[in-house]
Image: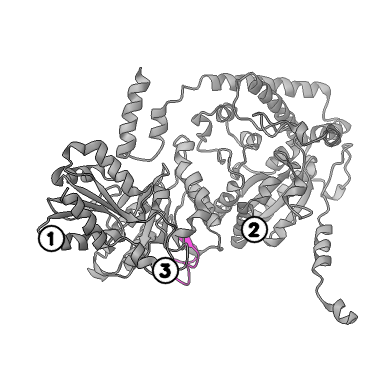
Amino acid sequence: MAQLTMIQAITDALRCELKDDENVLVFGEDVGVNGGVFRATEGLQKEFGEDRVFDTPLAESGIGGLTIGLALQGFRPVPEIQFFGFIYEVMDSVSGQLARMRYRTGGALGAPVTIRSPFGGGVHTPEMHSDSLEGLMASQPGLKVVVPSTPYDAKGLLISSIRDNDPVVFLEHLKLYRSFREEVPEESYTIPLGKADVKREGTDLSIFAYGAMVHESLKAAELLEKEEYSVEVVDLRTIQPLDIETIIASVEKTGRAVVVQEAQKQAGIAANVVAEITERAILSLEAPVLRVAAPDTIYPFPQAEAVWLPNAKDIVETAKKVLTF
Amino acid sequence: MASQKSKQFDPVANLHEIEEKFEMFQILNEEGEIVNADADPKLSDAELVELMSRMVFTRILDQRSISLNRQGRLGFYAPTAGQEASQIASHYALEKEDYILPGYRDVPQIVWHGLPLYKAFLFSRGHFIGNQIPEDVNVLPPQIIIGAQYIQTAGVALGMQKRGKKSVAVTYTGDGGSSQGDFYEGINFAGAFRSPAIFIVQNNQFAISTPRELQTAAKTIAQKGIAAGIPSILVDGMDPLAVFVATRDARQRAVNGEGPSLIETMCYRYGPHTMAGDDPTRYRTSDTDSQWEKKDPIVRFRKYLEAKGLWSEEKEAEVIEKAKEEIKAAVKEADAAPKQKVTELIRNMNDGDLPYNLQEQYEIFKEKESK
């Protein structure tokens, strides 16, 4: 097994699927010769040819329409939206068209599409490159939304997403692309969509997180361990649909929960998780479920980013409120 | 100085020069006379009669649809009268393997491409069976978002190209639709990939109430194709022969690997935008209406065919009678469609097992619907 970064694991997943299924097409802005601005598609055009891996004109809405049309011709398109902040340009194709395809045709037509896109803060980008807009996607019925937090998960989840017969939005956190390596099998493997992963077991408190916040939550769990608290960290991995079984089982075990998201607090994924816990497990709760999230401003200018983004310390602070309630 | 200036590129003169070149392509004039014999497609007698029959059928379908809508027996409906040459003669140049991405006014084309008529009525009534396209019919359900079908057409065309098919993707929008960003992205993508697509703009002069002049400073919509580097033509959209030839030629280029084309058809919708309360008297004069009615595609084609001895009152009555019967049967079939259930809608959300939320909601509605 090789030690891979998340970006390498993603390239590896694309390579596996391009090899296994001739209907898989990879395209977007600069994904060909250039291998993508983050090198997610490095070497793929050379290996699979310009017919399978290709550059498009610079227009996200056009890429969305291209995706839908190719799916209608029996392909399994894997478009890249260069940065997820650009998704507004292609919202109609994603939410207005792809998400509705199976439903509006009474099941006659499907859209086996995986939209890959980098997102997330902490790397000092210009505007519209770092926003956490996953909540927008998760509020659209008909889309699955996947956010991996490790190289191993990224490969298995991306392969599952590509094989899924319905549209999946696959969000890759910029800060995790090259932040660490781990062992990733060379062969193809899948991790089921809609399944969370208990990244650390504990008995006193459950922390639910996804993307980069999984790592801040793990750091927080370590800090809390020094104070004799046993903290469980659950990586949601798929944020739509949620793995309700794993979430509820964890809450029933610990009786206390904190939900962490990098996105602004208002109307987010964390709010949804809190609502599900409240509806399903209120009698197991020893304390209110609290959230750790970014403030409800527009994504900050890079110089304020470090303070704005939630971190392990913020999580510890909130966790203590819940633990000592 | 003067001689230096004369050497400069003159963007104003250049614009006018390009715009002047977009003369309207016509074969059959308002009197039903061939005015451009070189371009005459020389359709056989049977083909001419078939094209006329389809246009008459479509006019009757429009009249019946409006009447059914007024009786509360049809839902959303966008009238088509006046646009028969643009819609039916362009479709007549296509083959079964071609793929149509219609706007919401383009129901006649997809019906003539094989969508059972009762499904078109169910689409209008708001039943998902109307959108369940049979596997061997290459159409999408009508698009509601203006312009979305243009970018999707670029995708279908690229897909056909990758599959090595000898077919084309064809889409329709209106003059208003040509202002959308997706219009430009669609023609530009197809042009960049040299994909087999035909982009048709039915310029019926009004986007709901907004006149064509307010959409753009461009003298023609056809000229917008030039910027995308694709062959473009302005056609008399009330002339079935001209529309047929423009579409046939665009199709030929596309399947020959010469890429996409843009066709602007100058036409008019006699009726309101839709049957949901639009009142054309607020934005059009009856003078304008009657000027366009003189150009009517069915009137001029009738004259042309009668002069050739191919058409008569009896023949037309026969076609109308047949259309009425078919429409009646289709309405009956639509009436027989099963009542739509929320459980079915939930089931159509995704392939495979339902996620937990939908599964729970399915059970709730199953219970409700069993009562």
Which residue is drawn at the image coordinates 34% and 25% (left, top)?
B366
The residue that label 3 is drawn on is: A302
Ranked by sequence position, the earlier of labels 3 and 1 is 1
Q: Tell me where residue B229 sits by quadrant.
A: bottom right
SS type, badge 2: loop
Left or right position of B190 against A175: right
Do the residues indicated by labels 3 and 1 lie within the same chain of the protein? yes
Residue A33 is a magenta residue: yes
- Residue type, mark 3 in image: Pro
Residue B280 is a magenta residue: no
Which residue is drawn at the image coordinates 63% and 30% (left, top)?
B77
Which residue is drawn at the image coordinates 57% and 26% (left, top)?
B118
Residue A314 position, x and y percent, is 26, 60
- Residue type, mark 2 in image: Gly
Residue A84 higher or lower than B40, as above or below: below
| Range shown magenta | A26-52
As measured in the structure, the alpha-carbon distance from the residue carrying label 1 to the one carrying label 2 is 65 Å
Mark 1 surroundings within 10 Å by alpha-carbon count, few (fewer than 14), some (14 through 19), many (20 or more): few
Left or right position of B312 against A219: right
